[in-house]
Amino acid sequence: MDSERVTFCGLRFWCWGRKVLGRSQKRETERKMTRKEDLEPNNPADTFMAMVELGIDSKIRTRTCRSWGKCFTHMKEDQITQSLHLGRSRLPWSSTPSSPCLFHFKIRSELRKFSRSGKRKWAILVGILALTHMSLLLSYGRYLLPDGRRLKLPSENNALVETPSQNALLRNTLAVNLSEVPVGLEKNGYVSGSVLRNEPEDDEGFVDSVEFESFEDAKDSVIIKDVAESDDSLFPSEKIVMQNEGVLTSNHEHRVPNVSLQSQENVKSSKLSSGSSSITSHVLGNSSLLVIKQVSKKKKKMRCDLPPKTVTTIDEMNRILARHRKSSRAMRPRWSSRRDDEILAARKEIENAPVAPIDRELFPPIFRNVSMFKRSYELMERMLKVYVYKEGNRPIFHTPILKGLYASEGWFMKLMEGNKHYTVKDPRRAHLYYMPFSARMLEYTLYVRNSHNRTNLRQFLKEYTEHISSKYPFFNRTDGADHFLVACHDWAPYETRHHMEHCIKALCNADITAGFKIGRDISLPETYVRAAKNPLRDLGGKPPSQRRTLAFYAGSMHGYLRPILLQHWKDKDPEMKIYGRMPLGVASKMNYIDQMKSSKYCICPKGYEVNSPRVVESIFYECVPVIISDNFVPPFFEVLDWSAFSVVVAEKDIPRLKDILLAIPEEKYVKMQTAVRKAQRHFLWHAKPERYDLFHMVLHSIWYNRVFQAKLPTRSSSSIRSLNQKAMNSEKEEQPLMEIDDSANVLDLTSCQLHSLESVELPPTLTELDLTANRLSGLDSRIAQLSMLKKLSLRQNLIDDSAVEPLSLWEALSDLEELILRDNKLAKVPDIRIFSKLLVFDISFNEITSLQGLSKASSTLKELYVSKNEVNKIAEIEHLDDLQILELGSNRLRVMENMENFTKLEELWLGRNRIKVVNLCGLKCIKKISLQSNRLTSMKGFEDCVALEELYLSHNGISKMEGLSALVNLRVLDVSNNKLTSVDDIQNLTKLEDLWLNDNQIESLEAITEAVTGSKEKLTTIYLENNPCAKSSDYVAVLRQIFPNVEQIDSNLFA
């Protein structure tokens, strides 16, 4: 079939699919259609109506097709067209969806072909095939039309009209231009609710129509009409008045909203009101002529059609996340629960997570802090319990949709409700509460199409929230802060506003300008699942060397941004393959998926909303995503570092898109593409959930944000209660709040949003005081009187240099052993010489440039943390010869000076500095050294570190392995991302378990096997990807034969 015939079948079967007639009408119509003598060719409207009615049952019999075809064969073309219009206008469904506009087809010739005796079987076959085919493509039917003949669709305009007789829901129906005037009709006429005109109103060739409800008198008749924009004139188009039926005016473009008529005693006093139009009534004969003097204003543009007024950059989002960690917005529980204690204990463990050992399932560069993530994930697996509410009926609740654009919410619902490890039947044991509704099914079930009114959706969820809060006490305990929902529909932020304001929301539409709260809400990946039974179909992509296209995009022109992208780049550059819908010539050679698999960068512009399924599709097909969407919070923003595997381009920089991509060095692109492949496992759905997969990542982010916004319970907002840490080991399920008394020795006021300690009692017996994550800008003088205090934490506050000056005068705190000033606003190290017994001192994440304040610190100090500052030398701490842990990462150090004094040092962390030469003489007790991301070119300098067990030297410029032969205790060696061409000097490393050599220039596989012969039995993990020697297809098999106990080679895991 050609496109016209396919389209004709599609449009016809679209009408048939509407089940609007009663069963008795269907049976009667089928009876009439199967009897040729009952057909009346002179009454084409009845014929068409019968055809529609019969089509609902989807039973096309041979006799029916023959009778139907012969009936239309005897009709003239204008009669056939007229019958189509008449029948279409008389269909009695209550709400008409946006439908394609009918136009001229060669109906008569087509029907004659189908009616020939030799074609009867073909008629049946074609009908069945067309019905089956078009049932899959109904929503795309209009796009089957040729581009030159495609017609625009008017959106419906519904209005509730009040009359003395009844209330009527009116709508615009379909009106069609006719090239020939139908028999029996005037030049302009009204027939069954449609206006038929013989003069097109515009180039598109269609005229909007008018529908009305007619009563006994003209004054009782009501109409709904479209209007043309005009300042002071009446309608320029023709008008026709029919006695006792009302007034019709045909026009196009704009429409009068909310039209209603209030009929009074006479025509003059009748009122036709509109939201933005002034309407009067005139008497003309026995009918009423209604004239609009001032037409309605143009409809305001939707928010998605306009650029955002303000733009929040990724850096600003990072600062928002940091502020949220310092000052949580969650409500304080109204009464205590053992679950609060467990969550607060978990947060302490996560915040103080030790450096995680190498995990072959995680790729550290894509995480903000892989140690915190790993510890949090382990605690989630061990502790987390979720209660799933059983309330709610299908299909809105407990009905997962596993296919399509909004499949993410459905997959999570399915896997969460079927999970026995995390879910509990007793809600008192739960840390989190899941409200299992589908935003997609909510819209599908309750939204009145084209009504532009979503109030009923929000009201429905409000009533649901009120129901569970009245039936259970848990929602009101925290005002919903420990409740969460997962919704992928674009409307979810609106639907859950106010009544679910404090809940944790996992949303695909993560728009920071639309109420998305960084640090509380979760950015949910929008996954377009094409096959529910096989969500991993077509997974993977080509290696970087085989990706010839610089950038690729193809898709619909949704929103304001995509047309701008096409305007600048469509057909402008052969390296930039930017399309709207993919041209047939391009798609026939390489389809959409293959294009993504063959491109270096995949462009992911926003559509109607900020998120796009192309972000996950890019990762799915191992293409580096280029996100063009201002104010979009990327998925799992709280744990993932998106700068490692994506490119974020501001909307205003679209004209410079190619320059931005070309400015990325090839080496960096290869690293990003590698990171995409590593991140891929975190964005995959599995029928049976796997560790670190998408289900667990969503659940972990919900858990992670809840942990960091949890607060201490309280009975009133005016007083602060204490949490006794000893009670955390209590076996009681629920325990009463504990007042602060004189015998208390531990006081934890973490995340209480305190600006001062005026309202807090400080018992003199305190030994530990934790004020982490508050808003303190100064120190309370009463702390100086706590003579028994051993640990003081002021982490994540607003403390500056002037606030800590009194510390040097607090002689009563001379027994202090641990002082935490991490993540504040310090520009210099406070004077701590008075603390003669201090063991742990943490001033990381400040703005310190010099360690001068430590020059007189007590030599008893064993742990010193100064990471993430601006320190450029460490001479001031050379007297701290008892140090066991020294962390100086992310500073500006260029030289390792006076390190020989730290003879007791066991861990040294110097990553992300500017060090060029290693100087570690005399460090015979050291066990862990990290010099990642420095400027090393040689491995000399480790000869004295004979106790060394872990050595991290990735992301440097090392070209030769040397100086390692004495490190016989080494278990982990990471020299990835360097310039190595061979592997030497590690034959004596007989205890080596993990060897990271990826992203180097090693060519010989045999040399590697010879170099690690001594650790042949011990080696369990080896990374060699992105080396010349790893290009061989069988190198994995060769390595497995050489190393019998190996458990992982690159990303390949073995049992």
Image (cartoon, rainbow, N blue to C red):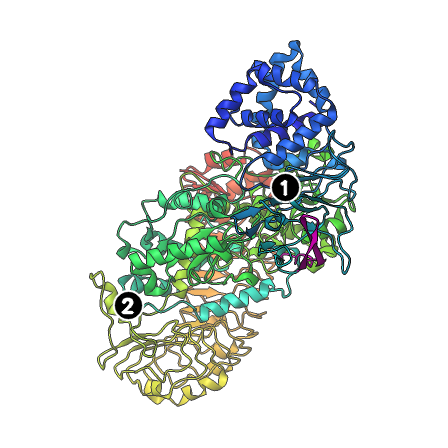
The answer to whether residue 740 is left or right of residue 632 is left
Q: Residues within 10 Å of mark 2 (few under 14, many from 20)?
A: some
The answer to whether residue 659 is left or right of residue 260 is right
What residue is pinned by disc 2?
335
Q: Residues within 10 Å of mark 1 (few under 14, many from 20)?
A: many
| Residue 910 vs residue 865, the one in the foreground | 865
In the picture shown, does residue 908 fall above or below 94?
Answer: below
| Residue 437 vs residue 172, the one in the foreground | 172
Q: Nearer the viewer, mark 2 or mark 1?
A: 1
| Residue 607 vs residue 99, the one in the foreground | 99
- In the image, the segment drawn in magenta is 277-302
Could you tell me residue 99's position as x and y percent?
63, 38
What residue is pinned by disc 1?
173
Quadrant showing the C terminus: top left
The tag on residue 656 is: none
Q: Is residue 263 magenta?
A: no
| Residue 814 vs residue 156, the one in the foreground | 156
Query: Is residue 371 visible to the viewer in this orientation of the structure?
Result: yes
